[in-house]
Image: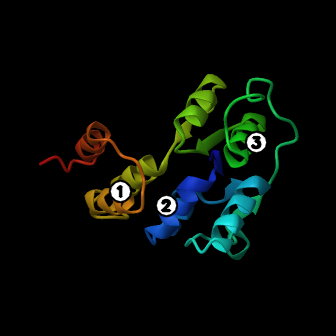
Amino acid sequence: MADVVCNTSPLQYLFQLDSLEILHALAGEVLIPSAVSRELAAGRRRGESLPEPSLLPWISLRDPKTIHPLIVGRRLGPGERDAVALAAELANPIVVLDDAIARRLAVQLGIPVMGTLRVLLDAKRAGMVPAVEPFLTRLQSLGFYLDPQTRASVLELAGENA
């Protein structure tokens, strides 16, 4: 099984959808760098509904030992930077990211990538959720950017096109 490294936004949105356990069911153990834990804590201090990783036994903190040279100088947040750097150090990683720049960088480094939408699609394929469309609507109400073409593509992949 792959080592799954997750950034802040997928944890945030899955938690706010009351569906964080989907990630656990699909991935087993999930690794997050300390920077992701700090971003979640900062959001909780601002009153945002965010998970506390230390209360989730299937989430482990692990920091990258180094920052890959291709990552240095990129416009990434600390969580994204460290999630990609940690995944780059692992033998069989998958990194869960929503940010487009971080996703492109991970692909450039040869790291398989998935995001919140892929987690939801995989959950439907595994029979864990009956439909993806209600999640997309809720994501958008939470501020998740989802352009109409991507929404239509996700619904088609889920077999929910009207």
x%, y% of residue 156? Answer: 23, 42
- Dot 2: few (<14), some (14–19), or many (≥20) neighbours within 10 Å? many
Viewer-side label of 1, 2: 1
Q: Residue furthest front?
A: 46
Whether residue 88 is situated above or below residue 3 in the rendered picture: above
Q: Can residue 130 be seen here?
A: yes
Viewer-side label of 2, 3: 2
- For marks 3 and 1, give the CA distance: 29 Å
Q: Are marks 3 and 1 in contact (CB under 8 Å)?
A: no
Badge 2 marks a residue whose secondary structure is: helix
Q: Can residue 33 be seen here?
A: no
Left or right of 117, for residue 56: right
User: Where is residue 123, by image quadrant?
Assistant: bottom left
- Dot 3: few (<14), some (14–19), or many (≥20) neighbours within 10 Å? many
**Residue at the location (26% across, 41% down)?**
148
Q: Residue furthest right?
A: 65
Q: Earlier in the sequence, mark 3 or mark 1?
A: 3
Dot 2 corresponds to which residue? 13
Identify which amino acid the numbered label 3 is placed on. Answer: Leu
Dot 1 corresponds to which residue? 140
- For marks 2 and 3, give the CA distance: 21 Å
- For marks 1 and 2, give the CA distance: 10 Å
Dot 3 corresponds to which residue? 86
**Residue at the location (82% across, 43% down)?**
64
Identify which amino acid the numbered label 2 is placed on. Answer: Tyr
Q: Earlier in the sequence, mark 2 or mark 3?
A: 2
User: Where is residue 139, by image quadrant?
Assistant: bottom left
Which one is in front, 40 or 60? 40
Whether residue 14 is situated above or below residue 147 in the rendered picture: below
